[in-house]
Amino acid sequence: MFPNFIDYLDDDSSAFTESGKTLRFKNQNIEVINDIPRFTPNHSYSTGNFSKLREKHATLQLDSKNGTHDRERTVLERTQWPREFFKGKTILECGCGAGPDTEILRSFGARVLSVDIAGVDIARNNIGNDENVSFVQASIMDLPFKKKSFDIVWCHRVIQHTPDPKATLNHILQFVKDDGAVFVHSYARTYAQMLRWKYLLWPITKRMDPEKLYNAIKFYAPLANKFTNFMLKFPAGKYFNFFFVPFCNYRNFYPSKGFNPPLDEQLLEHGIHDTFDALSPEYDEPLSATYMREMAQKHLSRPVDVAEHHTITLMRTQV
């Protein structure tokens, strides 16, 4: 945990007890377990979907564990920031999951304050003891930090899964310094994204028991993997897979994802992980590029690029 972690809290009288097991914050006693202040309970709207992914695939997305540079490449390509830009910056990471971005941001020389609403212990265990990383269990819709206190506000693959993405974006942008930078990712609100198999099935699958849904995906995944591999042999096969086959097959993208040569078991596990990730969340509401631009104009002083692709929309400070 940061030596000056207390300085970021929105209460100048905040203090840890002598035992370190309690944080006094705004006249409340916040429990501290595994060096993680717990502003929210372990059970939340993410329980059953994202918590299950962390339990069953705790290290799948970590470059240090999967032998690829996929997450590092993704971070650099999506931000369009040089790795030197991160060095020495203090980053508020809104939604850390199992910690794959946390690992990359630290490798670039940043200090990272990582927040998630529940299940933060898996990320804490993945990253290990690092005095330049602080984990906090809290809602990114109600952050306990001082406004305008971070060099970078970071929210990657998270915001569309909050109960109110618009309110969440409006909230988190208040924590970046006036001369700071932001990176926010959302699924795109485009025809290509909204008409694919995911959003046709999701209204049904989100109501299913998560364990049964996960087991069903795991059962049909080998056959779906073989079928989508076969379809990739045809010129329009990847488009057929994208719109009609409920399985995430990355074989067509393996060179860029770092699977070179591709490992069938690894690609299959990624397919199971991401298919469940697509079909299980309680909330999934992509933000429009228009709204992102409105929020950037409202909160940010530095020039911002909002780039809308067919499946994702990115808000990123120009550097």
Image (tube, rainbow, N blue to C red):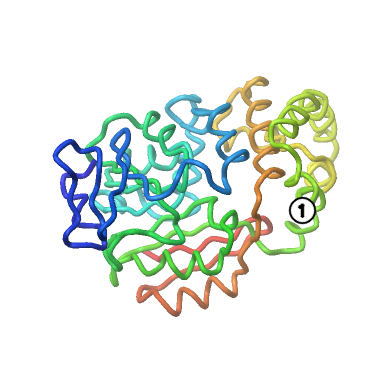
Callout 1: 10 Å neighbours few (<14), some, many (20+)? Answer: some
Which residue lies at the image location 71% right of the left edge and 31% below the top edge?
214
**Circle 1 SS class:** helix
Q: Is residue 130 above or below residue 184?
A: above
Which residue lies at the image location 22% right of the left edge and 62% below the top edge?
11
**How many marks are shown on the rendered structure?**
1
The image quadrant where one finds the C terminus is bottom left
The amino acid pointed to by label 1 is Tyr
Q: Is residue 264 above or below residue 203?
A: above
Which residue lies at the image location 82% right of the left edge and 52% below the top edge?
200
**Residue 120 image point, x, y percent:** 42, 39
Which residue lies at the image location 54% right of the left edge and 50% below the top edge?
157
Using the image as rendered, state which of residue 303 and residue 183 is in the foreground.
Answer: 183
**Residue 189 image point, x, y percent:** 68, 64
* Residue where numbered disc 1 is placed: 199
Using the image as rendered, state which of residue 205 and residue 319 is in the foreground.
Answer: 205
Using the image as rendered, state which of residue 154 and residue 47 is in the foreground.
Answer: 47
Where, by quadrant of the figure, is residue 252 drawn?
top right
**Residue 228 image point, x, y percent:** 81, 33
Q: Is residue 240 above or below residue 26?
A: above
Using the image as rendered, state which of residue 228 and residue 154 is in the foreground.
Answer: 154
**Residue 177 image point, x, y percent:** 29, 67
Residue furthest left in the image: 18
Q: Is residue 227 above or below residue 200?
A: above
- Is 88 on the left-hand or right-hand side of 292? left
Where, by quadrant of the figure, is residue 227 drawn?
top right
